[in-house]
Amino acid sequence: MGFLTNFFNKFFKNLFGKKSHLKLGLYGPPNGGKSTLANRICKDWLGEELSTVSNIPHETREIQVKEQVNIKNKKGKEISFSLVDTPGIATKIDYEDFIKKGMKAKTAKKRAKEATKGVIESIRWLDDMDAVSVVLDATQDPYSQVNITIVGNLAARNIPVLIVANKMDLKKAKMDKVKAAFPQYKVVGVSAKYDKNINDFYEHLFKLVG
């Protein structure tokens, strides 16, 4: 009887338990380093990049997805997921900010319109996410309205979250401040650009969804 009970418990756990393939979303404000991290993940495990990276905010204006990313940890455990790089979320998008970056008015207005559409799409896609890494620029104030909005949306949906404090190679980066802002979540500090502490990021991913 005990054998049958264990058998069925295991059977139903496998049937209704954690998904074998997940959707992992990279979310955060513009220029936090989402696309840089997405490229790092794809280069590490697929040998190719995913996104265009730029110093101009809202460079990623459409959802970009890389299917079938498989990563392994030191123990040989493997997780498979679709990596979703989302446009930077902002509470306000002003075309004049693009003009300040050197764009002509017509191009700036077009960029602002696309960026606004991208924000709406990012929020809409949240309902499809199995887990989210919120990628933040660790040199910026973590208590911003944008960050609170993002985390609030994730908490409302009960989505597992890993906070990534990016740009830790910069002197102004404040890991402790990011941790203090989000005590309810695990925070990992990385430099996606210079491949620093990325293995720690992967280990935290396994803990989040494994």
Image: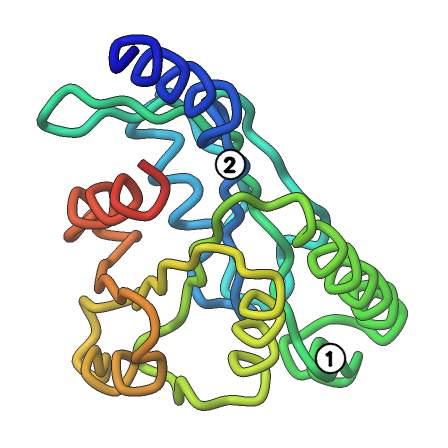
Label 2 sits on a secondary structure element that is: strand
What's the amino acid at mark 2?
A: Leu
Upstream in sequence: badge 2 or badge 1: 2
Residue shown at the point (25%, 45%) measured from the top left:
207
Residue 34 position in % (x across, y down): 46, 55
Question: Is residue 64 toward the left or the right of residue 2 in the image?
Answer: right
Classify residue 162 by image quadrant.
bottom left
Q: Are marks 2 and 1 in contact (CB under 8 Å)?
A: no
In this view, the residue in front, 89 or 50, is 89
Classify residue 191 by image quadrant.
bottom left
Kindly report which numbered mark, 2 or 1, lies closer to the viewer in this rendering.
2
View extreme (left): residue: 74
Question: Is residue 135 toward the left or the right of residue 45 in the image?
Answer: right
In this view, the residue in front, 187 or 15, is 15
Reading the image, the residue beneath label 2 is 83
Where 25 sits versus 12, above or below? Answer: below
In this view, the residue in front, 181 or 174, is 181
Residue shown at the point (16%, 49%) measured from the top left:
200
What's the amino acid at mark 1?
A: Ile
Q: Which label was assigned to residue 99?
A: 1
Where 156 sits versus 69, above or below? Answer: below
Question: Is residue 206 toward the left or the right of residue 148 in the image?
Answer: left
Residue shown at the point (15%, 19%) measured from the top left:
76
Residue 159 position in % (x across, y down): 52, 56
Question: Is residue 129 toward the left or the right of residue 47 in the image?
Answer: right
Classify residue 168 by image quadrant.
bottom left
The quadrant of the image that shows the C terminus is top left
In this view, the residue in front, 29 or 188, is 188
